[in-house]
Amino acid sequence: MAIHRRYALWPATGIPFPPVISRAVVLVLSSLALCTELRASEIQRGEYLTRAADCIGCHTSNPSRPFAGGYRVPTPFGDVYSTNITPDLETGIGRYSADEFVRAVKKGIRRDGADLYPAMPYDSFAAMSREDVLAIRAYILAQPPISQPRPRNILPFPFNQRWTVALWKLANLQTGSFTPDRSRTAAWNRGAYLVEVLGHCGACHTPRNATFGMDEDHKLAGGTAGIWHAFNITSDKIAGVGGWSNEELSRFLKTGAVPGKAYAGGPMAETVMNSLQHLSDDDIQAIVAYLRDVPTQPGDEKQPRFSWGNAAAAAADGDAGTEGMTQGSGTATGDDLYRSLCSTCHGANGGGSPDGYYPSLTRNSTPGAATPEDVVMTILEGVKAGDVAGRQSMAAFGGWLDNGQMAALANYVTARFGNPDLSVTAADVRQMRAGTTTSQTIMILAAQSLVAGAAVLMLGLLLLLARRLRRGATSARLMFAHRDRR
């Protein structure tokens, strides 16, 4: 009887029978597990996309504080420092809503409504899908918050005025997500998305137009990353990578090293280390497939960058009179400097080590380029290879050598192992140390003159308008005064 009473109470109280409760608990737990699994899957996908976009490369100044910002991004107009994108509430993005984060990535607008400087490549990210942006957000928000304020940007007038960014956006920012080309293969479309959008390759490898946006008429024909020159990566056989096999291109993207062709340095070496080495083989091959189809763009090169010099010839002419071409500071020749600083790793003949651990300087795109910036910057800043595929990093000599010695060593390397038409002076090196080149300085002065001229014109128009308004007001007062006298 007692048992009967206990069960009779269940309907009276409105509480389900125990088996129903059990099923409900199972459903709730299953839903929670599914949500957790979906969340973990989104975070994992976000990690891959974050790698592909190389977010850590620009948003990390101290490897022990990933994504905390403070990384110096040199631009033709000065230095911009990256923001903290950890979940920190005060100095990071912890207070950004999903919509605010998407707006920042795709439109370059901060949470407070201010425009972000286009050192962040949101002109490429603008075509990213909302789902990919939110997956990146999920991964970043899962990282530890780090409190680290962003250093103040170092920009001359008028580029330190954020209103100028609005003008740049008006001329260069295109909105709208990536639309696959249905006439192309899935691999081609994936490669296009990786190159044009997520990987933002054009930010460095495409030259800039008069408004400092990417020149789409010369897509991937070669550009700059700070002082570093980003090479032409179209399929032109002389200026680009038309002389590379697909396997060589894939290997370079994955490891940054292809003996007989090129060794990545500067920002490209860091991109391989932080981003490209982590991509799947299918994505690497998709990038190659797309690059092969980009319209070829010729350049000023006389022969392919990798075709200059060979170790045997360098060994034969090692004592054949390069001293006169490599004088720098007057205290040491390029030959002396090379023997004491470089030959232990790269060999007396520039052939590197047989296993490729130390790269050859002959048949190498850096000394064989049409411009000397990358040779100078490699000596100044070294190479951060991160031991990718066994590559050895190179020490920076910028703190050891004066400008004259730097010029002497760079001229010796290009004259003996690479393009003999290249040369730099101590003054050139001094500019590069300061983070600029002659052409960039001229470009800044031209832009400042243009803005100043526009400001003067605007002021003149305002003064003219004010003068006309005053005259109109005076005429109106005289008219009313005349009417009152009548």
Image (spheres, rainbow, N blue to C red):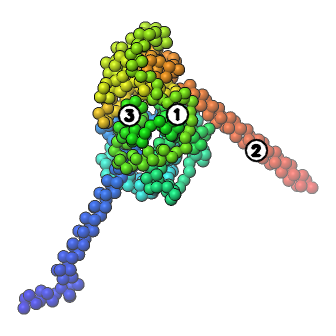
| Badge 1 amino acid | Ala
Q: Residue furthest bottom?
A: 1
Disc 3 target residue: 258
Disc 2 target residue: 465
Q: Earlier in the sequence, mark 3 or mark 1?
A: 1
> Marks 3 and 2, how far apart in space?
64 Å
| Badge 2 amino acid | Leu
Q: Is residue 31 above or below residue 386?
A: below
In front: 157, or 396? 396
Disc 1 target residue: 239
Dot 3 falls on a residue whose secondary structure is: strand
Q: Is residue 194 above or below residue 82?
A: below
Q: Report the mark closest to the observer, 3 or 2.
A: 3
Res 254 seen here = yes
- The residue shown at (49%, 55%) is 184
Indicate the quadrant where residue 77 lies: top right
Dot 2 falls on a residue whose secondary structure is: helix
Q: Is residue 207 left or right of residue 397?
A: right
Q: Earlier in the sequence, mark 3 or mark 2?
A: 3
